[in-house]
């Protein structure tokens, strides 16, 4: 191997990785200081799914690690009345970094997730610095600087910083490229497989994209090296085998996630629409932000070097052409629908459609390294790169994503980058080479820190302005958690955290066992069942909400319900404090397992009141005829409200038995509804297609039986026929007493197993108040376990009158298949490792006079004219 292409030593690589990590942490935290974001300021970081999903799931992991969770690895008994947990673990908590939550106090869960985010970002920078020095030798500090450029890319600070599981993909890309390098030269085969397995276990979604990106890098490396066909095929075969075995080792978790996705509520399909070219170019610049555009910023030093690559004649022509074309083609693939679908596993995501943008950022940084590692670009090359940058800025200036503060940051960063690179070009010869190189490093480092901190701070402020945000753990959550802990009686009954939610996964954050559940894997059965019962949801059906209704409380054995005041953080402007007292109401409810006379023979209908009665097994509602009228007393066509001045305060009139509890079901109404004579109104939240409003209690019917509900819509909507339901509480108590008398005498729950003792001579159907999701198997008495049947969406087990016990166990779909694939992959890896060890022992030792650095395998020795770096 040529001296100029020898890999850097471990100490040099370690210094580069450490520098990348330090620069990344410094810029990341400085950005939050500038943005006054927690933990360095008063502004919350908990925007969108970070507050709604990821922090609650990390809180649940904390509870699991400390033995305080209801459930285990198989079943999460706290959410969605019982949901499979392994798919969520693989989707949100598969990273080894997630385990760090255990060392933080429970009430500092927000800080724990922030520290994990910082450490992941720093690790990505270190991994990229390591990769760069493995690809080409060069200045260690330059590799560290470019590693930090990758870690602080626009995708990282704008998108992944509040989706921390995506950061595992940011780490995976350079590590998978390293595994490809090892496969090329036939080294570290076992380690390469383990790297692939770790990446796919940590977050298979972004690992899939990173694997595609690493495959493209590997292909280009092969083309540039141009080895003999036999050696090229052997190298490609080793890489494919490494990937296959690594994915196979991760199969136990990946298969569970895949099948969990198959059984999840489908949400809503989005057609891909590429962004305008000026928006694409704008996201290359610092401090630009746009939720639905590709965040391609990598810092101006890296961008200038990548732009200079086609003009830098010190770089071999094949290398210049290859890396330039790869960057361009992958960037264009972001904008073409077929390749967009390929990047996203053939399913357009419901959020940002450019989740693969980190791959382009990685390729830009690698291209920049190839420019610099062959020597600093001379002035003429820098001038050409600066001209291209100016052209990008001019074209991007037409985009609305460019803010006024973009230009001063752009100019200062460009001046620092160009000045640093110019000084570095002069540091290649002469007595003052060391001093000039040091000055160049300081200038480039300063430019990188400044523009990255500004870009991250701008993204943080922009997210708060454009996305929903939630308060971190504070007095409100503390009071909720304390009230739930005092009322908790699981598994004798459930304690619901309440309709007045703080985040969409309140049960995971503050405790209890409720209907609330928000995940990409929310089951289709759960969402459709609760919707049929009058439940509301957000996120197009994947975030189901608690339903404050006595009938569903009896059906699902909710014996305690928490009532909190509205979240003060959601008011504008927010104010301090937890918003007032927290109350708990209790109810006598049947156990989790009840016995019904006959199996379910009819399906749900359009009325949620009749659907609730089907599950309950008793008639408890009167559903009167309703009339929707405008302010002038005229009937509103189709029940439409909120369309025109004549419907500022429409009314709903109906007749109910005196003293009955009045409920309003208006899933497509947004605003407030107030029953005449009631102290307070109810809030309905509907926004097509994202939100569906839940059924709400309005209060007792007046003695006259004639009721009038005044609506105050805040957007167009409609009130359906049969919107009012009048609940006879006496009948409900009698129904609950009957179910209790014939229900289980004792219920025990442990992770994925539920056991119940039944009264003697129980016949009919045992109904378990748990959604009948795929994977449940049940047996009555000592019978053989069989797939559970369904009773209007709940688990059902036929009884023969002789069995006095019931056992239901949950087996996550895909776990057996994934375990079998994982075991086969492990066995194959072990066999290959043994064969490799035997082959090495039989191989002749290298000549003792051969220098250590010359003993590197020559499995891919290039043909004349090939890239010597390969």
Image (cartoon, grey):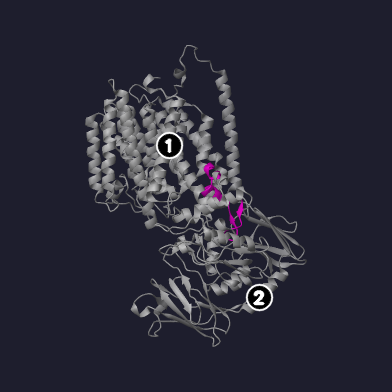
Residue shown at 33% from the left, 33% from the top: 442
The magenta segment is 73-99
Residue contact at pointers 1 and 2, CB within 8 angstroms: no
Q: Where is residue 696 in the image (x, y as percent from the top left)?
A: 51, 72
Which image quarter: residue 754? bottom right
Q: In this view, does 868 lie above or below 338?
A: above
Is residue 392 visible in this depiction of the protein? yes
Tag 2 secondary structure: helix
Q: Nearer the viewer, residue 750 or 622?
A: 750
Residue shown at 35% from the left, 26% from the top: 867
Q: Position of residue 521 (x, y in %)?
A: 52, 55
Q: Which of marks 1 and 2 is nearer the N terminus?
A: 1
Outermost residue to the front: 576
Say whether residue 634 is magenta: no
Tag nearer the camera, 1 or 2 = 1
Q: Residue 22 carries which label?
A: 1
Which image quarter: residue 513? bottom right
Left of 329 or right of it: where is 773? Answer: right
Q: Position of residue 735 (x, y in %)?
A: 66, 74
- Of the 4 image quadrants, the one containing the C terminus is top left
Left of 610 or right of it: where is 743? Answer: right
Would you call the spot at circle 2 few (<14 residues within 10 Å), some (14-19), or many (20 or more)? some
Residue shown at 66% from the left, 69% from the top: 589
Q: Where is residue 730 in the image (x, y as percent from the top left)?
A: 64, 79
Q: Which of 118 and 93 is in front in this view?
A: 118
- Of the 4 image quadrants, the one containing the N terminus is top left
Q: Residue 733 carries which label?
A: 2
Left of 488 or right of it: where is 804? Answer: right
Q: Is residue 835 above or below residue 762?
A: above
* Marks 1 and 2, how far apart at CA: 64 Å
Is residue 298 visible in this depiction of the protein? no
Left of 238 or right of it: where is 657? Answer: right
């Amino acid at each position: 191997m040529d001296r100029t292409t020898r890999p850097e030593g471990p100490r040099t690589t370690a210094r580069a990785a450490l520098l990348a990590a330090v620069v990344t942490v410094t810029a990341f935290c400085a950005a939050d200081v500038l943005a006054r974001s927690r933990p360095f300021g008063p502004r919350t970081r908990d925007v969108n799914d970070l507050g709604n999903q990821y922090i609650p799931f990390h809180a649940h992991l904390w509870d699991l690690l400390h033995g305080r969770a209801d459930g285990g690895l198989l079943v999460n008994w706290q959410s969605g009345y019982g949901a499979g947990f392994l798919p969520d673990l693989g989707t949100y908590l598969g990273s080894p970094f997630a385990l760090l939550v255990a060392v933080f106090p429970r009430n500092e869960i927000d800080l724990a997730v922030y520290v994990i985010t910082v450490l992941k970002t720093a690790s990505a920078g270190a991994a990229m610095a390591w990769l760069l020095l493995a690809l080409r030798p060069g200045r260690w500090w330059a590799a560290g600087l470019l590693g930090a450029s990758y870690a602080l890319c626009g995708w990282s600070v704008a998108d992944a910083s509040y989706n921390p599981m995506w950061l595992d993909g940011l780490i995976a890309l350079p590590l998978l490229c390293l595994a490809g390098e090892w496969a090329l030269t036939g080294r570290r085969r076992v380690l390469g497989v383990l790297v692939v397995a770790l990446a796919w276990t940590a977050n298979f979604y972004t690992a899939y994209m990173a694997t595609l990106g690493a495959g493209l890098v590997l292909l280009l490396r092969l083309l540039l090296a141009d080895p003999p066909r036999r050696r090229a095929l052997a190298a490609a075969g080793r890489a494919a085998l490494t990937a296959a075995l690594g994915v196979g080792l991760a199969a136990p978790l990946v298969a569970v996630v895949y099948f969990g996705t198959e059984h999840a509520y489908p949400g809503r399909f989005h057609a891909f629409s590429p962004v305008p070219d000026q928006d694409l170019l704008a996201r290359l610049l610092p401090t630009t932000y746009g939720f639905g555009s590709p965040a391609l910023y990598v810092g101006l030093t890296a961008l200038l070097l990548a732009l200079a690559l086609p003009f830098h004649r010190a770089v071999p022509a094949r290398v210049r052409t290859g890396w330039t074309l790869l960057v361009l083609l992958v960037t264009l693939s972001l904008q073409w629908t077929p390749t967009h679908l390929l990047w996203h596993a053939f399913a357009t995501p419901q959020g940002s459609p450019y989740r693969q943008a980190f791959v382009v950022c990685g390729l830009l940084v690698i291209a920049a390294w190839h420019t610099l590692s062959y020597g600093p670009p001379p002035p003429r090359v820098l001038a050409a790169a600066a001209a291209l940058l100016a052209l990008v800025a001019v074209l991007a200036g037409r985009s609305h994503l460019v803010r006024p503060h973009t230009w001063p940051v752009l100019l200062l960063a460009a001046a620092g980058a160009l000045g640093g690179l110019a000084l570095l070009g002069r540091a290649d010869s002469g007595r003052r080479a060391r001093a000039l190189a040091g000055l160049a490093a300081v200038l480039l480092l300063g430019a990188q820190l400044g523009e990255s901190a500004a870009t991250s701070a701008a993204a943080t402020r922009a997210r708060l302005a454009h996305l929903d945000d939630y308060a971190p753990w504070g007095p409100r959550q503390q009071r909720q958690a304390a009230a739930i802990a005092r009322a908790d009686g699981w598994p004798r009954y459930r304690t619901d955290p309440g309709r007045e939610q703080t985040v969409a996964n309140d049960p995971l954050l503050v405790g209890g066992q409720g209907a609330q559940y928000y995940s990409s894997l929310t089951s289709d059965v759960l969402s459709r069942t609760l919707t049929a019962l009058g439940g509301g949801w957000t996120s197009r059906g994947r975030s189901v909400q608690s339903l404050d209704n006595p009938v569903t409380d009896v059906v699902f054995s909710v014996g305690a319900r928490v009532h909190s005041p509205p979240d003060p953080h959601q008011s504008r402007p927010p104010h301090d404090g937890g918003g007032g007292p927290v109350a708990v109401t209790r109810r006598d409810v049947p156990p989790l397992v009840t016995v019904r006379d006959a199996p379910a023979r009819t399906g749900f209908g359009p009325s949620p009141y009749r659907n609730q009665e089907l599950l309950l097994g008793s008639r408890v509602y009167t559903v009167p005829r309703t009339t929707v009228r405008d302010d002038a007393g005229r009937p509103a066509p189709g029940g439409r409200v909120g369309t025109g001045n004549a419907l500022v305060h429409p009314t709903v009139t109906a007749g109910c038995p005196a003293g009955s509890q009045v409920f309003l079901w208006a899933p497509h109404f947004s605003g407030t509804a107030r029953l005449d004579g009631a102290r307070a109104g109810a809030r309905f939240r509907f926004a097509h297609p994202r939100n569906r409003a839940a059924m709400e209690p309005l209060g007792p019917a007046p003695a006259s039986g004639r009721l009038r509900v005044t609506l105050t819509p805040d957007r167009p909507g409609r009130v359906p026929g049969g919107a009012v339901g009048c609940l006879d509480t006496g009948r409900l108590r009698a129904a609950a007493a009957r179910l209790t008398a014939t229900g289980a005498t004792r219920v025990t729950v442990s992770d994925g197993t539920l056991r119940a003792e039944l009264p003697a001579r129980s016949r009919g159907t045992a109904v378990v108040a748990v959604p009948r999701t795929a994977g449940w198997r049940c047996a009555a008495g000592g019978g053989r376990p069989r797939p559970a049947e369904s009773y209007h969406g709940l688990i059902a087990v036929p009884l023969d009158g002789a069995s006095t016990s019931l056992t239901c166990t949950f087996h996550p779909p895909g776990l057996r298949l994934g375990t079998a694939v994982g075991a086969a992959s492990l066995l194959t890896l072990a066999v290959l490792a043994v064969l490799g060890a035997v082959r090495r022992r039989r191989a002749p030792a290298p000549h003792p006079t051969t220098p250590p650095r010359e003993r590197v395998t020559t499995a891919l020795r290039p043909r004349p004219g090939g890239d010597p770096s390969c």
